[in-house]
Amino acid sequence: MGKGTLSNFNNEKLQKIVSIYLSEGEDAVLKQFDLSKETFNRYMREARKRGISTIDRGKLVSQIVQNYTDKELEAIAKGGRIIPGYAKVPIISFEGERIRVGAITDTHIGSVDFHEERLYQAFDEFHKEKIDFMVHAGDVLEGMSNRPGHIYELSHLGYDLQKKYAVECLSQWRDTCIYAISGNHDRWYVKSSGANALGDIEKELKNFHFLGHDEGEISLKGKAALRLWHGEDGNSYALSYRLQKILESLTGGEKPNAMLVGHVHKYVDIFERHVLCTSIGCIQSQTRWMRSKRIAAHPGFAIIDYWVNGNGICKKAATWHPFYS
């Protein structure tokens, strides 16, 4: 047998040799078939060439099981790669529970450039898409500043009329909760008379929740933090630059998983410092003051899906609904 050639062995015989090798070891094959070590190695090469596996899969699996955790084994089973130079398999799971958020900001209710039909159109879309809750990232009211000519930009004059109009408009949304923060326009009433407009709206609408001045946070299933932010800064030449600077200012241990941002009336979506950040435009159209300063407006609203698992937000999908007129 030791002098046999490979041509004398068909697949069946090669498979038998491989089977004995895998079950009993190399020495058993050498003895049973009277093979030299060199001939045995030739048969193994020929077996691999013919597509006959010479690997003891059971032994390999046993070794893998010993070297990896249950979660890592699950990752491997789903196609996770063992990367050279890494001791462990990087585990990324994109499976999680979806949370759908309807996002609006900068309504500026009480301004001549506020269009309630746009707000109601957003409500209709939120209802159709079955959002889990709505957020408002500030400047619910237009407020009243000391800027010359501002009074001529108002449809409703003063705190009482603007707050009453806001309650009337926001009461049209009955599906879920509205979580809101104040913006700089809302706080003009705080500064001038100590009146907290959003706190007062909360008292009149059961589903309206005031989270705080300028920023507030919402827990997503206790696994991730969604922060609302307004600010009193200004526009940037590059649209993403403002969001980048906001995120740079956050202390590492205090960063949220996601942010929804108002104030500059721009729609921008970025991922920076591992924070999913969206500036969500505005409901108010471009004002005469903005045009005089050559500041564009992005009227519209967003519906944002976050998928949350044990590690936080594992993926996100944002749909922007612009108003063109």
Image: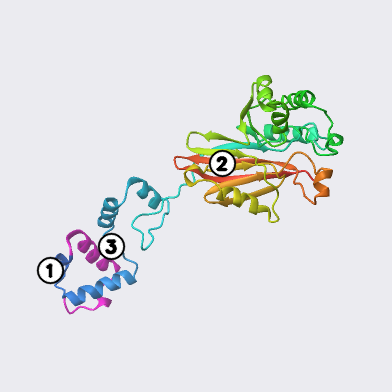
User: Which quarter shows the N terminus?
Assistant: bottom left
| Cα separation between marks 2 and 3 | 44 Å
Kind of residue at disc 2 = Tyr
Q: Which residue is mark 1?
A: 31
Task: Tell me whether circle 2 and circle 3 mark residues in contact (CB < 8 Å).
Answer: no
- First in residue order: circle 2 vs circle 3: 3
> Image quarter for residue 261?
top right
Give the magenta-colored segment's residue range: 1-25
Task: Give the residue number, with chain letter if any, for mark 3.
Answer: 55
x and y percentages locating residue 81 in the rendered image: 40, 57
Identify the residue at the far left of this view: 31
Q: Give the distance between the C-alpha atoms of the residues marked 1 and 3, in whole angstroms.
A: 20 Å
Q: Residue at x 69, y 29 (%)?
A: 190
Where's the C terminus, which quadrant?
top right
Circle nearer the N terminus (1, 2) = 1
Provide the residue designation for mark 2.
306
